[in-house]
């Protein structure tokens, strides 16, 4: 036995790099696991409850809610059109990119990536589910059909609502991270109420079924919560350590 000495102690930089890789791996596994779960659950919901082409178990309720909104949307059409325009996929992407740039300058933290990661993940989920669930929009989604709003033309597949998923994901991720960091509860409530308002605007315009926006809120919330938790696990130094070539 050589002097009873134990194994050599790794240098501090190697220990730090190992810890960084573990944190990045945990965050990546969290996001990947949640993304897979959302896709599986969403696809099953679409096939079993909504119907691959609509007309599923929930269709009767969807029809009833759609008729109610058709006769009670009143003064909210203008605001709903505004939200539909500025929170559509491309404008929302620009908003998220700008938000990430601003947060990068002010926070100097990986939390600046929250808007982009939340947005990309939400839109990816919508795209993936719509490759399986080919549900058509309500008749009121494409003017000049009866009951349609002038200037509204929505013809893509309907389940889930892209606005509900993506906007909810971004709001919940941003405000949820704030709530976790400050250990306060009210940002969660603000995120939920704002997300419900956006989802409701889709029903006001008649461009989605109720189940599209209801399940969209659930999927967006799940992804937003995952992004909020993952963002608190990783810093820039962790990412640099992962991509830095090994010494020696």
Image (spheres, rainbow, N blue to C red):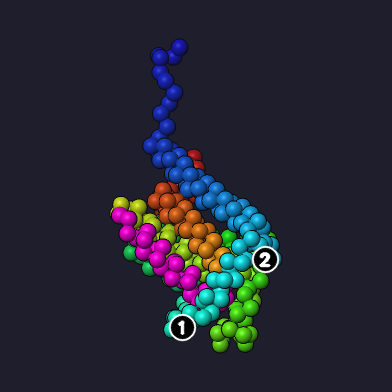
Residue placed most toward the observer, 204 or 131: 204
Q: Are marks 2 and 1 in contact (CB under 8 Å)?
A: no
Magenta run includes residue 196: yes
Task: Tell me the residue at 40%/40% (across/down).
Answer: 16
Residue 155 pos. (x, y %): 64, 76
- The residue shown at (60%, 80%) is 140
Whether residue 104 can be seen here:
no
Quadrant where the N terminus lies? Answer: top left
Left or right of residue 206, residue 1 in this image: left
Q: Earlier in the sequence, mark 2 or mark 1?
A: 2
Residue 171 x, y percent position in the rendering: 42, 64
At 56% from the left and 76% from the top, the residue drawn is 67
Pointer 2 residue: 55
Image location of residue 12, percent across then percent down: 38, 37
Name the dominant secondary structure of the magenta segment. helix
Q: Nearer the viewer, residue 57 or 208?
A: 57
Task: Look at the numbered disc 2 and give the secondary structure of its residue.
Answer: loop
**165 lies above or below 25:** below
Which stretch did the figure color magenta? 184-208
Residue 74 — which label? 1
| Secondary structure state at the residue bearing disc 1 | helix
Where is residue 148 shown, x and y percent of the image? 58, 83
Residue most extreme to the top: 1
**Horizontal placement of 142 versus 78: left or right?**
right
Give yes or no for residue 51 being in the magenta stretch: no
The foreground one among 70 and 53 is 70
């Amino acid at each position: 036995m050589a002097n009873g000495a134990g194994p050599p102690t790794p240098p501090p930089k190697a220990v730090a790099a190992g810890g960084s890789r573990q944190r990045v791996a945990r965050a990546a596994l969290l996001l990947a696991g949640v993304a897979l779960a959302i896709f599986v659950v969403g696809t099953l919901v679409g096939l079993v409850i909504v119907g691959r082409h609509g007309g599923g178990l929930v269709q009767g309720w969807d029809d009833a809610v759609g008729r109610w909104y058709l006769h009670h949307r009143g003064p909210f059409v203008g605001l709903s059109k505004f939200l539909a325009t500025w929170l559509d996929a491309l404008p929302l992407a620009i908003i998220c990119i700008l938000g990430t740039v601003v947060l990068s300058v002010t926070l100097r933290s990986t939390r600046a990536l929250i808007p982009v990661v939340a947005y990309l993940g939400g839109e990816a989920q919508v795209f993936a589910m719509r490759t399986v669930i080919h549900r058509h929009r309500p008749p009121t989604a494409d003017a000049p059909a009866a009951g349609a709003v002038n200037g509204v033309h929505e013809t893509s597949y309907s389940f889930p609502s892209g606005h509900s998923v993506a906007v909810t994901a971004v709001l919940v991720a941003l405000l949820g991270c704030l709530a976790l960091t400050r250990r306060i509860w009210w940002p969660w409530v603000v995120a939920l109420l704002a997300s419900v308002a956006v989802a409701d605007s889709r029903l006001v315009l008649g461009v989605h079924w109720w189940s599209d926006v209801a399940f969209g809120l659930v999927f967006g919330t799940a992804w937003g919560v995952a992004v909020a938790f993952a963002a608190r696990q990783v810093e820039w130094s962790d990412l640099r350590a992962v991509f830095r070539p090994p010494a020696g």
